[in-house]
């Protein structure tokens, strides 16, 4: 293989054969192709794209660069492209397991505004996400679900290529994103894959056209590799749920897993004593139901009903609690810690630390909540990391007290801010949250949560 000739052809918009792509990825993973040539390849793909056959070959080569797992019986996983307040994996994976599926889920630590799924789980004292593949298999066999950190054995070609893309301006390319996401998910081995492709200001994919294109490519790629697959394109202009920040999000996920879907602090703010529809519950049920329905070959309505029942009857929470225990985590200690934090931050909507909140400047309705700005506030407070070596403060973050469409009055608290290790950042973060929550004089139209379904 003469790499320069492959680069010439790709630069001119030509197509590479599966054998050429496989040889290139293998040689790069071994260290026989230097970073500068692979960066040139990635840039040529960014500019020229890839055919479906090329994307499939890239995915296949990266998947087989490391270990490939297999699971007995029915197995499924959900992958999200990530967004602000996206704690859905914490609900969906145990929920799907409670419906009889094996759910092996390898997840990432987050770079950027807020932590990844693994960071969230590590806010539970003792939770060990760094399992060997053998221990990962043992936990799945024992309780049906494990959420563990991506290991070096899975798709090492992607680890190397993603780090290179990150510093060479070559992340935003649909074929490269598909190869990266799918290689890891296919190697993980679940028979059914459901994708949640986030779309909007707080997401990786900013436009609906790009999000739909990525969703279609992920589903096509997964099917081409012999898996059952579907994707939802979902809104990420506003944060998902009430909380943004690692321990706060785990706490919210636990509330949902226990069958709750309302935050007490919110009801007085809108003047209604009603339970509100909750985006975390709605989306969790919808995504988990697709995993169950595809894996078992049963109807979607039946699967939705089973998911709702298992949230209400405690079966999903029991799976979560068992998973946490098998990972060495202490859920009682976590919940006790959270109770202390709630009391000290005044979750009763009359916070005792004035800088740690944002209040409404005028009477009106919550017209929008800018996910990106709330994410930036959480980052300021210590919930995210700019570099892989940065420490996260698990207790840092933002708890929203209002949501889209709520009626508010001037001076009413809109959000609480938690920054135990960086209290000096509270005023700047409060300003960001204040800017994020737009209040208008008339009630806004409701916003759809699910924008597109790709099957
Ligand atoms: N997430 C991934 O895992 N890979 C990408 O290329 C982009 C997002």
Image (tube, helix red, strand yellow):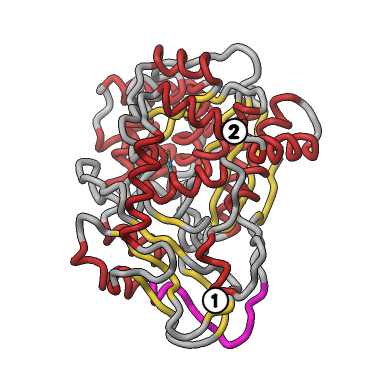
Residue at the image point whose x is 33% and y is 42% from the top: 165
Quarter of the figure that contains the C terminus: top right
Q: Earlier in the sequence, mark 2 or mark 1?
A: 2
Q: Nearer the viewer, residue 255 or 122?
A: 255
User: Is 144 on the left or on the right of 455, as rendered?
Assistant: left
Q: Position of residue 2 (x, y in %)?
A: 33, 25
User: Is 36 on the left or on the right of 331, as rendered?
Assistant: left
Q: Nearer the viewer, residue 61 or 47?
A: 61
Q: Position of residue 255 (x, y in %)?
A: 53, 46
State yes or no: residue 437 in magenta. yes
> Where, by quadrant of the figure, is residue 42 drawn?
top left
> Where, by quadrant of the figure, is residue 324 drawn?
top left
Say which residue label 2 marks: 316
Residue at the image point whose x is 42% and y is 15% from the top: 67
Q: Which residues are magenta?
A: 433-445
Q: Residues within 10 Å of mark 2 (few under 14, many from 20)?
A: many
- Indicate which quadrant contains ligand 1: top left
Residue at the image point whose x is 66% and y is 40% from the top: 312
Q: Is residue 173 above or below residue 121?
A: below
Q: Nearer the viewer, residue 377 or 153?
A: 377
User: Is 437 on the left or on the right of 152, as rendered?
Assistant: right
Q: Residues within 10 Å of mark 1 (few under 14, many from 20)?
A: many
Q: Is residue 274 above or below residue 180?
A: below
User: Is 360 on the left or on the right of 408, as rendered?
Assistant: left
Residue at the image point whose x is 27% and y is 61% from the top: 380
Numbered disc in front, either 2 or 1 = 2
Q: Marks 2 and 1, how far apart in space?
A: 33 Å
Q: Position of residue 454 (x, y in %)?
A: 69, 44
């Amino acid at each position: 293989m003469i790499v320069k000739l492959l680069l010439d052809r790709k630069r001119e918009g030509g197509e590479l054969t599966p054998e050429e792509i496989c040889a290139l990825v293998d040689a790069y993973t071994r260290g026989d192709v230097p970073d500068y040539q692979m960066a040139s390849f990635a840039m040529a793909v960014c500019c020229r794209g890839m055919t479906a056959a090329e994307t499939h070959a890239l995915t296949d080569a990266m998947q087989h660069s490391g270990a490939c797992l297999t699971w007995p019986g029915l197995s499924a996983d959900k992958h999200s492209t990530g967004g602000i307040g996206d704690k859905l994996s914490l609900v969906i994976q145990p929920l799907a397991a409670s419906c009889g599926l094996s759910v092996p889920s390898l997840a990432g630590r987050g770079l950027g505004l807020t932590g990844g799924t693994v960071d969230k789980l590590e806010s539970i004292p003792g939770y060990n996400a760094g399992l060997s593949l053998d221990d990962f298999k043992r936990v799945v066999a024992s309780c049906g679900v494990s959420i563990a950190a991506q290991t070096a054995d899975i798709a090492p070609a992607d680890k190397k290529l993603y780090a290179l893309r990150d510093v060479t301006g070559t992340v935003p390319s649909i074929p490269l994103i598909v190869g990266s996401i799918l290689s890891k998910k296919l190697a993980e081995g679940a028979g059914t894959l459901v994708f949640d492709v986030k779309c909007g200001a707080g997401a990786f994919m900013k436009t609906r056209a790009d999000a739909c294109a990525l969703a279609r490519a992920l589903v096509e790629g997964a099917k081409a590799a012999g898996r059952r697959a579907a994707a939802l394109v979902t809104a990420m202009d506003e944060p998902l749920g009430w909380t943004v920040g690692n321990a706060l999000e785990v706490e919210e996920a636990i509330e949902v897993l226990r069958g709750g879907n309302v935050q007490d602090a919110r009801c007085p703010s809108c003047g209604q004593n009603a339970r509100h529809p909750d985006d975390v519950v709605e989306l969790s049920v919808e995504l988990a139901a697709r995993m169950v329905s595809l894996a078992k070959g049963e109807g979607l309505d039946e699967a939705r009903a089973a998911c709702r029942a298992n949230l209400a009857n405690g079966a999903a929470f029991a799976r979560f609690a068992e998973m946490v225990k098998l990972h060495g985590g202490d859920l009682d200690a976590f919940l006790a810690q959270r109770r202390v934090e709630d009391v000290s931050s005044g979750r009763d909507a009359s916070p005792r630390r004035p800088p740690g909140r944002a209040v409404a400047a005028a009477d009106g309705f919550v017209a929008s909540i800018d996910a990106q700005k709330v994410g930036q506030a959480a980052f300021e407070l210590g919930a995210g990391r700019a570099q892989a070596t940065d420490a996260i403060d698990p207790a840092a973050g933002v708890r929203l007290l209002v949501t889209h469409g709520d009626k508010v009055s001037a001076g009413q608290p809109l959000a609480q801010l938690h920054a135990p290790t960086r209290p000096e950042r509270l005023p700047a973060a409060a300003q960001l949250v204040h800017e994020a929550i737009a209040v208008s004089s008339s009630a806004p139209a409701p916003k759809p949560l699910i924008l597109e379904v790709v099957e």
